[in-house]
Amino acid sequence: MKTNKILKIILAVIIGEVLMILLITLAQEIIVDGVKLNSSPISNIIIGGLGTLMSGLTVGAVATCVAGKSNYIPIIILSIFVVIETTYLIIADKINNPIWFDAMAAISLIGTIWLGYYFNKFLFKED
């Protein structure tokens, strides 16, 4: 693998992770006051959830722009990061939601990251 391609992968992962942290924080903590299944109003859960999904689409598209449309390695790494973070939060008891709620949120986030990758890959034909 060429050095240029490796640097693009690293840059795409860093930008993607930072963007994901910022956008999800915006969606779940700033726009709404947290997303908790048992205590948040349904409107906060819907708005925070949709914001998180939009974050995933954006992260997937941006990471694909940085790394190149034929390179899905950053998307795999970002997906693994979501799994690791969710697993840590569940094991460390840092969440106040049922496990299934956060697991489904993580799976949905990973799915939208991949949708962002495919959206960008097929919408813009040039690499």
Image (cartoon, helix red, strand yellow):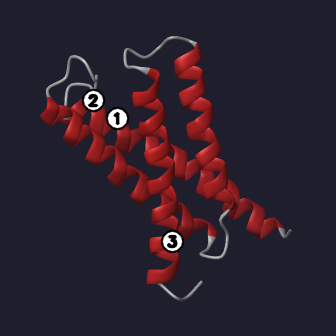
Disc number at residue 29? Answer: 2
Tell me, yes or no, whether the two marked residues, 3 and 2, touch with CB atoms within 8 Å. Answer: no
Q: Residue furthest right?
A: 1
Image-quadrant location for residue 39: top left
- Residue type marked 2: Glu
25 on left or right of 48? right
Tell me, yes or no, whether the two marked residues, 2 and 1, touch with CB atoms within 8 Å. Answer: yes
Q: CA distance from mark 3 to mark 2?
A: 28 Å
42 on left or right of 76? left
- Residue type marked 1: Thr
> Is the N terminus in the top left, top right, bottom left or bottom right quadrant?
bottom right
46 on left or right of 125? left
- How many residues crowd mark 3 within 10 Å: few (<14), some (14–19), many (20+)? some
Image coordinates of residue 42 in percent, x first then y, are 15, 32
Residue picked out by circle 1:
25
Q: Is residue 43 above or below residue 11?
A: above
Q: CA distance from mark 1 to mark 3?
A: 24 Å
Disc number at residue 118? Answer: 3
60 on left or right of 32? right
Closer to the camera, 67 or 81? 81
Q: Is residue 122 above or below residue 97?
A: below
Image-quadrant location for residue 82: top right
Question: Which one is closest to the eye, mark 3 or mark 2?
Answer: 3
Q: CA distance from mark 2 to mark 1?
A: 5 Å
Q: Is residue 99 above or below residue 57?
A: above
Q: Residue furthest top?
A: 93
N-terminal-most mark, 1 or 3? 1
Residue 61 at least partly seen: no
Q: Residue furthest bottom?
A: 125
